[in-house]
Amino acid sequence: MSKELTKDQYWELFEKLPQEIKTLILSEQTAKDIFNICDRNNVDMENVSQVADYTGRVLLGALKPEELQGVLEKVVFLQKDQAKKVAEEIHRFIFFPVKRQLEGFHKTETAPSTKPSVKTAPPKIPAKRKPRTPPRKDDYREQVN
């Protein structure tokens, strides 16, 4: 989850953004898209502003895109299927057009993974099998001279 940010921290994040994302955040069309997504998915009107807030946090880089659904469930208190549908539509209509820019600054802003590297064993090559021979003489074979 994301921590609460101060107004100054929001502005610092905003200043570092690529121009396309700045334009998207300030766009009236983005606000309309969020409203329409919430309306289609029966989100209560009092929760629309929270959905917009967390969408903005993703665009600012304060929240990872893959965390949006979980935040909608736990913080905005949407039902699981409702949060999933809202998050999918936000990804499709708002995040997808600026996918490269989002990936770029989400990769640079996050710390490198601390997971231990897992070495994979080379693929096992099956041992050659001996051809199966019938347990008794095959009566159906013809003699070849």
Image (cartoon, rainbow, N blue to C red):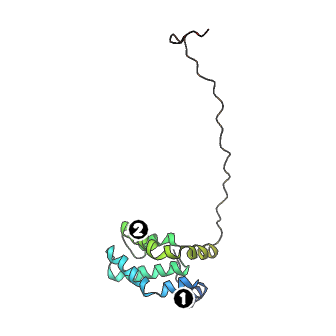
Q: Say which residue appears at 48% left-offset and 82% top-offset.
A: 56
97 or 107: nearer the viewer:
97
Residue matched to label 1:
6
Residue 26: % across, % down: 48, 88
Residue nearest the viewer, comparing 84 with 33: 33
Front residue of this view, candidates 47 and 101 = 101
Q: Quadrant of residue 122?
A: top right
- Determine the residue positioned at 41% across, 68% down: 84
Q: Are marks 2 and 1 in contact (CB under 8 Å)?
A: no
Look at 41% across and 81% down and name the residue there: 50
Q: Measured from the top left, where is residue 120 in percent x and y?
A: 66, 50
| 10 Å crowding of disc 1: few (<14), some (14-19), many (20+) | few
Label placed on residue 129: none
Q: Is 129 placed above or below 112 here?
A: above
Q: Which amino acid is tagged 1?
A: Thr
- Inspect this view and state whether residue 117 appears: yes
- The total number of labels drawn is 2
Q: Residue placed farthest to the front in the image?
A: 145
Question: On the picture, is 39 further left or further right than 55?
Answer: left
Residue 32 x %, y %: 38, 83
The amino acid sitting under disc 2 is Lys
Q: Quadrant of residue 49?
A: bottom left
Give the crowd class for mark 2: few <14, some 14-19, many >=20 residues within 10 Å. Answer: some
At x 64%, y 72%, the residue is: 111
State the SS at label 2: helix
Query: On the image, numbered disc 2 is attached to which residue?
Result: 84
